[in-house]
Amino acid sequence: MARLLLRDFDIRKAYLDGHAQAQLVDMLRPILKSAPLFRPTTASGKEMSVRMTSAGSLGWVSDKAGYRYQDLHPKGMSWPAIPDPILDIWRDLASSERDPDCCLINYYGEGTRMGLHQDKDEADFSWPVLSVSLGDDALFRIGNTTRGGKTESIWLNSGDVVIMGGPARLAYHGIDRIRFSSSRLLPKGGRINLTLRVAR
Ligand code: MD6
Ligand code: FE
């Protein structure tokens, strides 16, 4: 496992081996059954290209009313619990003091992207956000804590974990594109990104 620092983003290449990646995908199947992926709209009314759902006591949602964490899926059901093997990644790399209350699950199909954004809907920015990449390669772009300026990009591969804490916590970041079908982890291709957060 190689460790890389890019603008204070702490990147653990190949943190999960192939077996651990496949195990996580298996644990996500029942979650996606009970809390189906939905396509959020931004506050300005545009549909996002990624589809999302959550696990944990809180889930992140977005619609015309804005971005927020809430305790129910848009269809009204509770969010499923975060599986232990996912919590173990957080406990190992982020904190053994407190577990995250949200695991946001993003699915990137062919041609999807995620514009540059800050993660700032959480109550306390002293907690890091931790992200896990599964499936197809993704070009991750890192910017600054304000809009604009120079950016740097790095390819994230299946099994990589990124910890965004400290000075990086409020940095702009996004996914320019994925290399569809570059991985065989997900039978139908695409990429799953898990982000673990302390929301409240
Ligand atoms: C992604 N990730 O990797 C998008 N956010 O698909 C994020 O937006 C992200 O990787 C907060 C912290 C780490 C991340
Ligand atoms: Fe983010």
Image (cartoon, helix red, strand yellow):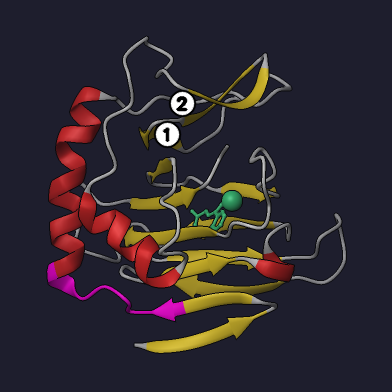
Seen at 63% across and 65% down, the residue is: 141
Instruction: Give the Cα distance between marks 2 and 1.
Output: 5 Å
Residue interval drawn in magenta: 12-19
Within 10 Å of the Cα at label 2, are there few (<14), some (14-19), or many (20+) other Cα atoms?
some
Seen at 35% across and 57% down, the residue is: 180
Say if mark 2 contacts mark 1, CB within 8 Å.
yes
Question: Dot 1: what SS?
Answer: strand
Q: Where does the image place residue 28, in percent across and percent down from the top left? A: 21, 43
Taking the view exactly as shown, the residue that stands out farthest to the front is 97
Question: Dot 2: what SS?
Answer: loop
Q: Where does the image place residue 197, in percent across and percent down from the top left? A: 50, 48
Mark 1, residue position: 51
Q: Which quadrant of the figure has residue 37?
A: top left
Q: Amino acid at mark 1?
A: Arg
Task: Say which of 124 and 115 sits in front.
Answer: 124
Taking the view exactly as shown, the residue that stands out farthest to the bottom is 2
Task: Say which of 132 and 95 sits in front.
Answer: 95
Task: Say which of 106 and 87 sits in front.
Answer: 87
Placement of the N terminus among the 4 image quadrants:
bottom left
Q: Where does the image place residue 16, in percent across and percent down from the top left? A: 26, 73
Task: Say which of 44 and 111 sits in front.
Answer: 44
Q: Which quadrant of the figure has residue 168?
A: bottom right
Q: Amino acid at mark 2?
A: Arg
Placement of the C terminus among the 4 image quadrants:
top right
Mark 2, residue position: 39
CB of mark 2 near ligand 1 (< 8 Å): no
Tell me: residue 148, above or below residue 93.
above
**Residue 180 counted in the magenta span:** no
